[in-house]
Amino acid sequence: MTNPVTRTDAVFLKHFAQLIAFLVVVAILLITLASHIYGRNPPPPRPGQEKVAEQRIAPVGGVYAGDTGRAAMQAAQEAAAKAAASQVAYGGTTDGKTIYGSLCHTCHDAGVAGAPKVSSKADWTARVAQGEETLLKHAIEGFTGAHGVMPPKGGNPALTDEQMKAVVEYILAEVK
């Protein structure tokens, strides 16, 4: 039986195996060197890392009873109301044009999801006939009609009722 591997092939395989072994040794040396360098120079601590950890492990709620509990719950509700008021959309502006340009134009310029286009007065004729109060109610609470969908507050719950009223007034002025 003849050996299927020729002498030339055997020499090639020997040299190839040596090359692979050399590359493995180099890789191990580089990994060791990197580990040594990294061990001597640890990364700087992240600012605020302790605060993030404290927020993660903070209790979600508390148990209160009696007058102390009522007072604590009332204080928490007041704090939540203040926090919500401070996060009013678009800096609290009541400029209907600004809010429309930032949010409402997405649907009302292109007619997305059946939204009436501001550029088409015919789309608004039946809606204007319902009255400003009805339009404001639909803008604030949302509306699903035969020809389209209006999400509550245009999909931005941070908008106040006053801001929505300003937008409705702006749109009505544009379509009249």
Image: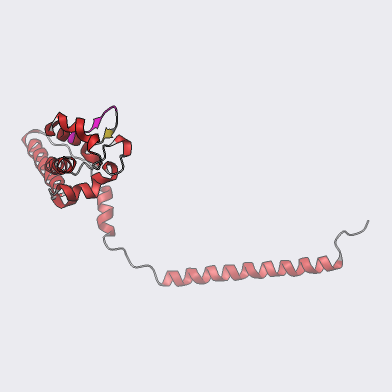
Q: Could you say where residue 174 lies in the image, as x and y percent from the top left?
A: 17, 43
Give the colour scheme of this rendering: secondary structure
Q: In the rendered image, which quarter contains the C terminus?
A: top left
Question: In which image quadrant can residue 148 be found?
Answer: top left
Give the magenta-colored segment's residue range: 140-146
Q: Could you say where residue 17 lies in the image, as x and y percent from the top left?
A: 72, 66
- Residue 88 visible? The answer is no
Query: 147 or 151: which is nearer to us?
Result: 147
**Residue at (28, 53) in percent of width and height:** 53
In the image, is 145 to the left or to the right of 29? left
In the image, is 9 to the left or to the right of 29? right
- The vertical placement of 29 against 105, above or below, is below
**Residue at (47, 71) in percent of width and height:** 36
Q: Is residue 14 part of the magenta span, yes or no?
A: no
**Residue at (11, 38) in percent of width and height:** 73
Query: 162 or 59: which is nearer to us?
Result: 162
- The vertical placement of 25 against 91, above or below, is below
- The vertical placement of 36 against 118, above or below, is below
In the image, is 65 to the left or to the right of 20? left
In the image, farthest residue toward the right: 1
**Residue at (29, 59) in percent of width and height:** 49
Q: In the rendered image, which quarter contains the N terminus?
A: bottom right
Q: Could you say where residue 154 lies in the image, as x and y percent from the top left?
A: 23, 40
Q: Could you say where residue 165 lies in the image, as x and y percent from the top left?
A: 13, 40
In the image, is 81 to the left or to the right of 11? left
In the image, farthest residue toward the top: 146
- Residue 139 visible? The answer is yes
